[in-house]
Structures are given as structure tokens and as C-alpha cells.
Amino acid sequence: MNYAGWKFVLALLALCASFTAAGEAPGVYFSHEVWEIVCDNTRTCRMAGYCAEGNYDEGCGSVLITRAAGPDTLLEGELTLADYESIYEWPHVLTLYIDGKVKGKLNIRENESLYPLTPTQIQALLAAARSDRTIKFEGDSISFTLSGKGVSAVMLKMDEFQGRIGTPGALIRKGEKPEESVLSPLPVPVIRAAKVSNAPPRALTAPEVAALKPLLLQSKGKNANEEECEFEDTDPTEVSDFTLTPLDERHVLISTRCRLYARDETVAFWVMDSALKGIPKFVMIETGEYQKGIIYGVFRSNCPVISRWVWDGREFRPSAGGHSGMCRNIPIHRGGTWSLPTFVTKIINADGSPRNSD
């Protein structure tokens, strides 16, 4: 694995660890060879496979197969291609070949650059991948070969996480245990977001920094990578690097950039009373920003890792977490190759109305 790959894995592990520390179950991530699986806190699992390592010049793409928790749930699948510089429009139809034999057509889903797979195609694809047969997709001048390396381990992990081993619906290690023994889906947590202030942020004054800096240092925590926030040097003659953002009448958010050489644009956050008289409560160290009651965390690489934290009037609560997949040289489009959540929630506004997705 290259350096960027290790940074991606470490960032993902940091995300999972930070959600666990916050008392939330973030799901599971597992990868083997060129296949990976992410299961979220509702027990829905998504596994993705890619072209073989080093075959990028021949064309690349990825297949995503999703299965919700619970007895008798079906597999859903779709395919995406790498962004090819030599074409301006993706093929409207792809043909699936297994060992050179046609196994059906895939029609593009307009405006999404995705090709849905039928249940029959999914079953044929997984069977071929497990037995290391040649799986190829072709359309117009584009083609790519899907690798089966690692798929069996990922399929077993999905069965294990969802409690399917030994049942008729298992992907691997089928048996006669009743389908009713399969784990049920878990409910989506609901977060009631508090109404936040529209007052603009401001820089802390030099006297405020002098008074608060020892308190911030004392309460300064570590992020999930065990990295401490080392404050940027603050020149009293210049604008402060410490920012105060009103949350509501009683609370403010204090933030400052950290000097962490392993990560870029890292910010530390604290919640404090609006009079700046109490003890600041450390929230997190993130590569992100605060907007309208939400801290958006993004590990910016070729394969982004994202997190969301929502202010509920007392604290910032984890509301979303996940990443975009291995990428495997697939350039970023739609914010990444896939959306693979480890943690999902439903957010409602303070008045009980549903909140639009961010």
C-alpha cells in the first residue's frame, strides 16, 4: 500500500475511533486485496470491488453491492467507470462478459454516471469473482476488467456482520439455519438539532487569548490518531488565530488551527459559555470547518473521509461518517467513487421538521 493509501486507512480508523469515543457505534470497515466492505450502524453493508492493482492503463471502474440487514433481503448493485480523458460522454450501454460470454447489458442511469446491475448479474458476477474467472465490462471504446481478488473474504465479512452464516441466504457458508435467525436492522438514530445563532464569528482579542490560552491548553485533548493540537504561534500585533463563533445565547464555539505535520489545515474546537468565564469543553480536532450548527470534517485526499457533528443545544453529536472507497486511481467525481457510510442518522430541526441533507 502506498503512502496515500496508508493515510486514507489511518484517517478512516481515526473516524471510527472518534465516533466510538463519543459513545456511538460507527459500523465496520474491512478490506482485502482489491475488495472492501463498509457496514453502518443500521447493519446495512456495502462492498466494493475494483480493477486489479496496476491495470489502470487498460481502464478502471468499480462495482458496489449493497445489502440491508434482516432476513431474505436482496442484493442491489451498480457500476461506475473511471473518468476517461479521451471521451466526453460515457457509453449508454455496457456489456457484461464472463470468460468471454455475454451475461447481459447494463444501461446507464442518466445524470448519475451509474449502471445498475440486475439480481441475476450480481449473482453471476460474485460467483465468477470467487472462482477467479475473467469479468469484463465493455461499451463503445471503453472496457475494464473487475478483479476477484479478496472478494471471498469480503463476502464472508458481510455474512458475519449481518448474522447470515449458516442460513440459506448467506453469500458464503450457506446452511439450514432459519432466515429468521438473521440479525434485524437497527433503527436510525434521530438527532434534534438546536437552533443556532446567526451572529458572525470574530477573532478573540489579545487579552481574551491571554486569559483563555492556559484553559484551552489544559482541556486540550487528543484526536483519534493520538495527535495533540500544538497551537500556531500567535503574534499579539496581528489578528488572532483563535476564533469565537456564537452558538446560542449561552454557548460559543472556540476554534484555532493546529500545527500537526501529519495532517493539513487541522482545527481544534471547544465549547464554552458565552461569558468566557467557565471551563472550555474540548470537542475534537478535525480537518474541517463549522457552518450553521454543524462541524464538517473532511480528510482531503484522493479518497475523502468525511464526518459530521451536529449541535443539539448541549453538545456536538456525531451525525454522519464514512468515506468514498479505495478509489484505485478512479478520479473523484460525485465527491468520490462511492458513498460508503459507517454512521448514519436522521436530523430534525428544533421545531420537529425534517432537515435537508447536507
Image (tube, helix red, strand yellow):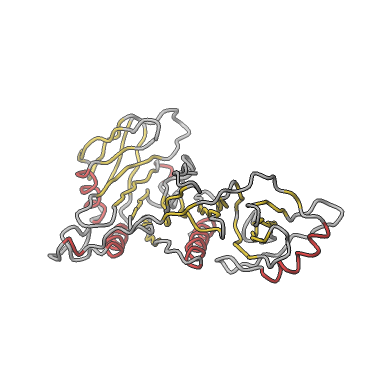
Q: Residue furthest bottom?
A: 218
Which of 45/220 is in front?
Answer: 220
Q: Is residue 253 left or right of residue 205?
A: left
Task: Kindly identify the residue that appears in the image at 46 percent across and 43 percent down.
Answer: 357
Q: Residue furthest right?
A: 237
Q: Is residue 263 above or below residue 227?
A: above
Q: Measuring from the top left, give residue 34's x and y in whole percent.
A: 38, 55
Q: Measuring from the top left, give residue 132's x and y in whole percent.
A: 26, 54
Q: Is residue 117 above or below residue 241?
A: above
Q: Measuring from the top left, give residue 217's x and y in whole percent.
A: 71, 68
Q: Measuring from the top left, give residue 15's x and y in whole percent.
A: 50, 60
Task: Kindly identify the residue that appears in the image at 21 percent across and 49 percent down.
Answer: 123
Q: So how many labels did they put on this image?
A: 0
Which of 225/188 is in front?
Answer: 188
Q: Is residue 204 left or right of residue 50?
A: right
Q: Is residue 64 left or right of residue 97?
A: right
Which of 281/115 is in front?
Answer: 281
Which of 1/41 is in front?
Answer: 41
Residue 207 figure quarter:
bottom right
Q: Is residue 96 left or right of residue 5?
A: left
Task: Kindly identify the residue that appears in the image at 37 percent across and 61 percent down.
Answer: 32
